[in-house]
Amino acid sequence: MKHVLYSGAAAVALTAGMAKAEQLTVFGPWLGPDQEMVEQVLGAFAEQSGHDVRYVGSDSFEQQIVVDAEAGSAPNIAIFPQPGLAADMASRGFLTPLGEDVASWVGENYAAGQSWVDLGTYEGPDGPALYGFFYKVDVKSLVWYVPENFEDFGYEIPETMEDLKALEEQMIADGETPWCVGLGSGGATGWPATDWVEDLVLRTQPPEVYDGWVSNEIPFNDERIVAAIEEFGSFIEDDKVSGGRGAVASTDFRDSPKGLFDVPAQCMMHRQASFIPAFFPEGTEVGVDADFFYFPAYAEKDLGTPVLGAGTLWAITNENEAAHELIAFLQTPEAHEIWMGLSGFLTPHTGVNLDAFASDSQRQMNEILLSATTFRFDASDLMPGGVGAGSFWTGMVDYAGGKDAEAVATEIQNSWDALK
């Protein structure tokens, strides 16, 4: 006997599914451990619905999903790592709207719910509609530190950006270096600085300005964006960053956090996303040897608690009843709690049991996400590739090397204009 854990609209969908089992194909970017974890979630859905659910992962997802859609052989559900591709496919009629009920549910049940509705809403053949359901999120607005170092110097976790700036000055007065920053990443060198700038746009301007910047309705060399770039520059002044400003661009981002753990420490803080512990020294235990806090907002600007991140959205690319039922299942706490109990999963779902997380650090990261008044997706991932994964990256390297912020921003804007 199957355990029915749906409610509301999901319960109606389940009844339909049990009456007529279907094959459901799900295509996404996950391989390896992530594939094993998503298959546990899909397995629970298959058990409850009676559908034959099959997941296929690919490291060429972005290219293959377009080929399959154009050939008329798309999977029932596609899992997009970036909204931009989903928006493009929606405009071409390759995605099925999820419906106003799903949009209402997201708005009511996700923290900063309207942010998630907006991120999943695209212009389709019949006008704008919700096409993407976000499930599995990453948080970027984090600062990492070594608790023992903070305890030795009596440093307290800053609650506001003003507190963080004061903490920087205290560290310098103590003869310590506040930050480790590395922009190196092979052919993608520069991307860590784009995250800094994005976080600072969200902390110095209303979210509408961020949105206008992402769409280029507000040009890159607008004074508000230039000011955010210069604000990033204030964090990499010679006395604030390990090795001085000149070392920032040449330091690999995977090596940059290691300065936290040197004896004596080369730096006290490192701003980076939730994935960075993978590059900590072997054996480092998050919550004991290293910990994190929210990259704070300015109290004086009264812009709430914005969070920068990324995530995957699930969209229907070949409609059948089972596809809609899976979207309904993703609205249940159970669908989130299964992956929460494994690893590498954060969710804006306000109805989940936070005790389901496999670790305290994952739970604490998720609390940062749930406390967000605004969530915005990584801007560079939303911009045209030639900008977001091109001139924005190289421009930040130039800026870190000493080039004027306005000149850099103008060059990036010129590259955007060239694409139009």
Image (spheres, grey):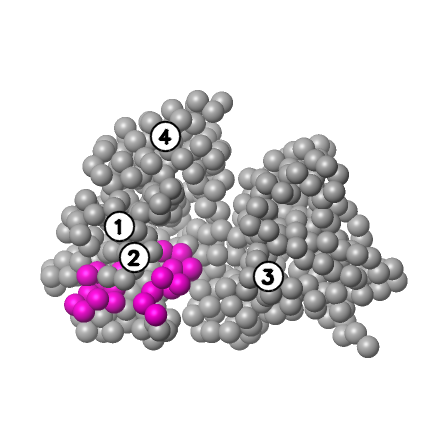
Give how far apart the Cα atoms at labels 4 and 3 are: 37 Å
Structural crowding at the residue carrying mark 4, measured as other residues with C-alpha within 10 Å and reported as few (<14), some (14–19) or many (≥20): many
Label 3, on which residue? 35
Q: Is residue 12 visible?
A: no
Q: Give the structural element (helix, strand or loop) at label 2.
A: loop
* Figure quadrant of residue 12: bottom right
Q: For mark 4, what is the residue? A: 412
- Distance from Cα at disc 1 to Cα at disc 2: 7 Å
Q: Amino acid at mark 3?
A: Gln
The residue identified by callout 2 is 255
Give the structural element (helix, strand or loop) at label 1.
loop
Q: Is residue 283 magenta?
A: no
**Residue count near mark 3 (Cα–Cα under 10 Å), binned few <14, some 14–19, many ≥20:** some
Q: Is residue 181 left or right of residue 310?
A: left
| Residue 46 x/y as whole percent | 75, 65
- Residue 395: x and y in percent read 32, 35
Residue at far right of view: 19
In the image, taking residue 69 as reference, residue 1 lies left or right, namely: right
Give the camera-side residue of 168 and 342. 342
Q: Secondary structure at mark 4?
A: helix
Circle 2 or circle 4, nearest the eye: 2
Exactly how many numbered labels are in the figure?
4
What distance separates the C-alpha of mark 1 from that of mark 3? 32 Å
**Residue carrying label 1:** 251
Mark 1 or 4 closer to N-term? 1
Asked if residue 140 is positioned above or below residue 122 in the image, the reply reads below
